[in-house]
Image (tube, rainbow, N blue to C red):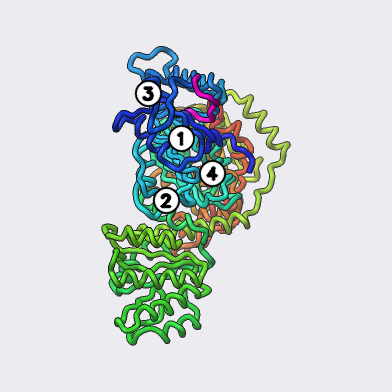
Amino acid sequence: MAEHRLDPLLQPASIALLGASERTDSPGRVLAEMVIHSQYQGSVYPVNPGYAQILGLPCFADLAALPVTVDHVIIALGNAHLEGALSAAIEHGAKAATIYSSAVLEQDSDPPLKQRLKDMARRAGIQICGINGMGFYNLQQQLYAGIFPRAEHIIRGGISYIAQSGSAFTTLCHNGCRLGFNLCVSAGDEMTTTVADYMDWCLEREDTRVIGLFLETVRDPQGFVAALEKANTRDIPVVILKIGKSALGAAMAVTHTGAIAGDRAVFQALFRRYGVIEVDDFDAMAAILMLLQYPRRAASGGFAAAFESGGFRELVTDTAVELGIDFAELDHPTVSTLEQHLDPGLKAENPLDLWGSHNRFEARFTACLTALMQDPNVAAGAFFSNFRDGYYLSEAIYRVVVAVSERVDKPIVLATCYSDLANNALGRRAYDAGIPLIDGVREALLAFKHLFAYRSFKQERAQQATPAPVDPAVAVDWRQRLSQHSTDTLDENQALDLLGAFAIPVVRREIVASEAELATAAAAIGFPVVLKTAQPGINHKSDCGGVFVGIQSEQDLLRHYRDISTRLGPTALLSQMADAGVEVALGTVNDSQFGPVIMVAAGGILVELLADRALAMCPVSPDQADAMLDSLKLNRLLLGLRGRPAVHRQALIDAIVDLSRLAFCLRDSIAEIDINPLIAHADGALAVDALILRRSPDR
């Protein structure tokens, strides 16, 4: 395998422990013990002028005294010594370093220490784990580069875990016995080496089966997206616990879309684009990692569950229905087999209650669970029981599940209905047998929901059509127009012109600035009409009484125009009155990190009132647009409700796709687009109002 740029950092051939110590309970002592007393096969050189030996190894006064040039210098020193230590490591010729300290000085100079270290490292091209982190564990090399004692039972496996928090780092890899890791990283402040870099390294490893991230922020957006794309290509799932989901400048947003979208929604759209499994807490993360650390993936079909308790079956069924998990419908041969082995009074169905009597229950359980898991409609399954160490029923069910697991290649799980159970020994045995043991009904079911969602993502991605390309001449023309535009926003008429150029249907309209122009425009458009102020600087016209709809006569039109002209100014927009239909809001926000995101929501005044929206990264395919509509409560209206006709769905889908193409094509020129409303009816869809915010060079 070709050398990766992070190899000197994460799998070095030699290490210097700068600050290693014999002092009990000091960080330098913990570091020395973890590295020297492990099975790490590389060369280790303790460095501390106060010792001749540390833990039986010769100790050197400084890096210059080392007999060789090491790959990696671990710096276990306080903030006051960091600058000199990193300078010495660079002068020594090291290619990588780990720094635990925060690099914050009480009385610092300008630029501060953090910036000086970063500048120094980037000039030298040295890779750094940290600052302000807890190091990393490479379990293949048995290299534990940390300053807090590690758990002795940490297991080697297929999970690559990267955390931007030290406590989050230890939460998973210092606890439990059911997760196996190949790499655990506490990324800290990512001075030179980012989450994206660690992901890329892990994605090159044959033993990586799943990547787990505890994510506060993304410091390298392009690298992060590239890593997600690489994970898709290599079929390695990515599980993310994202924190810090605050609104992204909502108070300063010009369009409704910008105010509604926010940072969390952008991340969710990004995650959906790349099939990321997003979880809300560590229990949910651990549960899905337990499933994905093994090579088995969900087959086609639904979920199967077996029980030794009717009460547990009802509990799990209720929760599964709440979470939207479909139980597989069993085929007739499976039902017949179950009926042969079930005790009298038990029904051959899924979910399946197996407990009737003690009579040969283990053999009956094995036969029934085998039939259940071999059913062609079953994708994956679980046996729910409160497993505990040393309990005969738990031991018997464990043997049943192991036996069935050897006969099928579908994921099968031991799941409990309560979390405070003494089952560590059984959990470790199950791990070694390739069977997850997940505590908690909701946690187990959420893990399966994520597993099925990832399966669906892979299927949809394989079938996804590429959106049609934009006419290059149209794109060049509008880039030039936008670059020469004198204001940050396009007025409504200009915005509708732009939408029309990208095949989005828009209303017929005319700009007027006098009563004579008004009469001419009305004759050309025909009644009924809509009159709106077009005075520059007024973005939300309804808020200032600048919109009159359903005008049926010349007399009423003239009266309303004179009102607008007196209060707001003479420039107005006269447009056709669109047919009644369902009001839909479409919009895009050009995220500063990840690019344009499209939003579909309930339109009109409901856009800000209802929390009913769907977002996706641009551009979207017709299938993605259709799925966005399916996810909305508004979809019931679109399909026809209480006698109302269904809208022309394809026209609405086309508008969403075309808007996403526009936003992606002109992403260097446009910051936000707001179409509210786009009216969808049985014969088509029509944009009747729009606001577009240009992207200035500093955005």
Q: Is residue 317 magenta?
A: no
Distance between the alpha carbons at the discs numbered 2 and 3:
34 Å
Say whether disc 1 or disc 2 marks the residue closer to the N-terminus: 2
Tell me, yes or no, if residue 347 can be seen here: yes
Which three-letter amino acid code belongs to the residue tagged 4?
A: Cys
- For disc 4, the neighbor class at 10 Å (few under 14, some 14 to 19, many from 20) is many
- Taking the spot 37% from the left edge, 49% from the top edge, the residue there is 153
Q: Amino acid at mark 3?
A: Tyr
- Sequence-earlier tag: 4 or 3: 3
Between label 4 and label 2, give the one nearer the viewer: 2
Frontmost of labels 3 and 1 is: 3
The reply to whether the C-beta atoms of the residues labelled 4 and 3 are less than 8 Å apart is: no
Considering only vertical position in the picture, is 535 above or below 422?
Answer: above
Q: Which residues are magenta?
A: 65-73
Q: Secondary structure at mark 3?
A: loop
Q: Name which residue type carries label 1.
A: His
- The location of residue 625, given as percent across then percent down, is 56, 52
Pointer 2 residue: 155
Q: Residue at x 43, y 13 (%)?
A: 110
Distance from Cα at disc 4 to Cα at disc 2 = 17 Å
Number of residues whose C-alpha sits closer than 10 Å to that of mark 3, classed few (under 14), some (14–19) or many (20 or more) = some
Sequence order check, earlier mark of 1 and 4: 4
Can you say whether 73 is above or below 230 in the image? above
Q: Secondary structure at mark 2?
A: strand
The quadrant of the image that shows the N terminus is top right
Q: Is residue 667 left or right of residue 155?
A: right
Could you say whether the residue bearing mark 1 is in a helix, strand or loop? loop
Looking at the picture, tell me which residue is in the foreground, 230 or 74. 74
- Whether residue 52 sits left or right of residue 537 in the image: it is left
Q: Which residue is mark 3?
A: 51
Task: Find disc 4 in the rendering and name its residue.
Answer: 202
